[in-house]
Amino acid sequence: MTFDDAAGNQPPTAGASRTPRALLLAFNHKPHEKVVALAERLLDEGARLDVVVLSDTNWADLAGRPNVRLFTLGAAEKRHPLLRTERIVVTSGPRRVARGLSRLAGGGTASGLSRRQERLSRAFHKRVFMKAYSNVRPLVLSRLADKRLSELDLERDPVDLIVASDALSITLGWRLARRFPNVVATTSLDPPPLAQLTAAA
Amino acid sequence: MTRPTRRPRILYLSFYFPPSRASGVYRARATANYLAEHGWDVTAFASPLSFLHRVIGSVDEQLAETVHPSVQVERPNISHFAWERDLHAYGRFRGMSPILARNLYNFGLKKFFPEHYLSWALASVRKALRMHARRRFDVVLATGNPFASFAAAWMIHKATGVPFAVDYRDAWTLNMFTEEPGYEPGHPAWRWERRILRDASASIFVNQPLLAWYADRYPNAADRMMVVPNGWDPDLLTQLDAPTPPSESDRDRPLRFSFLGTMNSTQPVEQMAEAFQIARRHPDLADAELNIHGHLGYFKQGKTDLIARLGLVEGEQGHALPEYGIHYRGPVSKTEVGKVYQDSDVLVFLAGGARYVTSGKIFEYMASGSPIVSVHAPGIAAQDVLAGYPLWFNPESLDVHDIAESMIAAGKAARDMSAKQRAEARAHADTFTRQAVTAPLEARLRSMVRRKIEAGRIAS
């Protein structure tokens, strides 16, 4: 996990008028254009924006902007015990076994065995593991994010709006909504203007 | 001693019912009121108020007051799963396993009934069976959309034997705007529609082209199909003035064109705005206004898109294009509708779709007795209704110049209109009052009860 702390995104100092703050959760690898448009809109409204993503590769345009912090979880997910175990059992383990057998068999049989093993591993990963894993993935991601939430400092500098922009980010959004019952937490990509939220607060 | 005659008891499944402001709600209100006024004991099942407030985002409380006092309105629950955006409202299961929850929800839609209103239909069936056990229903009438109400009527029929009728306010398996089937072959909607039309004692359509489309697909049910057009509600349109000729000062002031209704994304809104800008260059339409009254879109989110499509900008006068005389005037309470018609010289009939679309608003437009300009694709089903209306200006195309010419002609007609012309126009509209159009439906429902009595299935 990396935490890209932009210089412009500092908590407010005592006595200064408070700048609204929004938290955007966007776990899809490629964000939908509506999600990017929402981020732009929130920045235009003068918000300090924290975006929690799996990978920042598709967020390059936003990354350099003042008042934006990107918070990536993808690397931490790859290190998660569940995924590591699956890689050992389904991919790397069988690959080693296949290579060992290939060495014993030698020649064309060897490459055929490796190919079949690779194909089988990929098919299992895609059709069995990922289908099952997708059901618990939002929970896994929310727990990974939990470990680093302190860096967002939500207790001392509360957000005005939490948006879970896709299905994968709902669990994290839902847990934050329970933790901060007075904050507007939504899956809508057309939330009310921040000025309206801060005025209501 | 003879037993007192029991009033026939009808269960009316109408998800959109006052205080909903959905466009189909007037037909539901009029049907329930007409039946109540003609000796029926009416129980209406409608959407929960929480759905109208939280999902639809608006209600018309005044409209609710116009429902006949003897109509018993019940509001079975509906799951907000498909519409809920507030994470605070998510339960533990959905919060912790959103993808599994979504997959299970979609499985229900795919395997059982393909509509988000399924939970309301199931709750309606449960409630109906409980009520039927206490006091029997004689007939069930379901109106769609949502078509889950049809499924509920069918299930109640299967469980109790009570005959049912289905009222297609909209088409279900026909996309009225593309005029293509609305679902791919094998979709569960077809299976449901087939079994519903097989068992329904009557199926009702809003116009003949729609009936013909269904009769063609379900020939075995064709003899039980009928047309009940939409109409206008004299009790809601009380402020229409007596026909008076325009005065000299009226002739000099700029003309007022109006659109009144719910604008939606299927309507040719850009063409309407552009045509008006062209027409306004004509001396007869100098400084004319086009006032848009009503809601923009059915849901809260639709407004922004339509404002952009109309090219309106926010200013001191709200959303408008003041240099072209186009103004968005906002929603109108039902009690103010008559005043809007009274203050309009020409009405703009804007409608999406074509052959199968009538639009409920056209009847009210005709009742005003004002010139009407059509802005819709040629061949729309509403043309059958408008055909006898003497002040109808139809460009027969969506070309902005043709529409502009019709607007100019309608403007001239408005300036020169006599009291006699207005009275003739209103006389045509009188053939489409709700009373007139609902009477055959009431007769059909009554015949369904009579057949049931004759078959010895109910005791009076």
Image (spheres, helix red, strand yellow):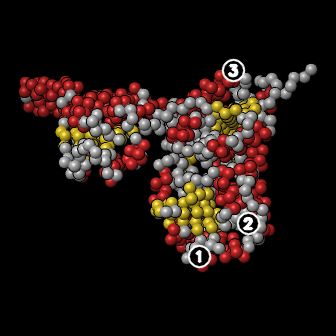
Q: Are marks 2 and 3 on the same chain?
A: yes
Check residue B286 in the rendering and tell me which mark sits there, or answer none.
1
Left of B103 or right of it: where is B264? Answer: right
Check residue B390 in the rendering and tell me which mark sits there, or answer none.
2
- Residue B459 drawn at (x, y percent): 80, 23
Secondary structure under the numbered disc 2 in the rendered image: loop
Left of A88 or right of it: where is B48? Answer: right
Q: Which one is nearer the viewer's eye here, A154 or B82? A: A154
Work out whether mark 1 precedes mark 3 in sequence or the reverse, and give the earlier one: 3
Q: Please report the residue visible at 60 percent of the width from the left and 42 percent of the height from the top.
A: B20
Which image quarter: residue A131?
top left
Work out whether mark 2 precedes mark 3 in sequence or the reverse, and give the earlier one: 3
Q: Chain of mark 3?
A: B
From mark 1 to mark 3, how far is it between C-alphas?
Answer: 66 Å
- Residue A86 drawn at (x, y percent): 21, 26
Indicate the quadrant containing the C terminus of chain B: top left, top right, bottom left or bottom right: top right
Tell me the kind of residue under disc 2: Pro
Task: Judge whether A91 appears above or below B244 on screen.
Answer: above
Q: Residues within 10 Å of mark 3 (few under 14, many from 20)?
A: few
Q: Residues within 10 Å of mark 2 (few under 14, many from 20)?
A: some
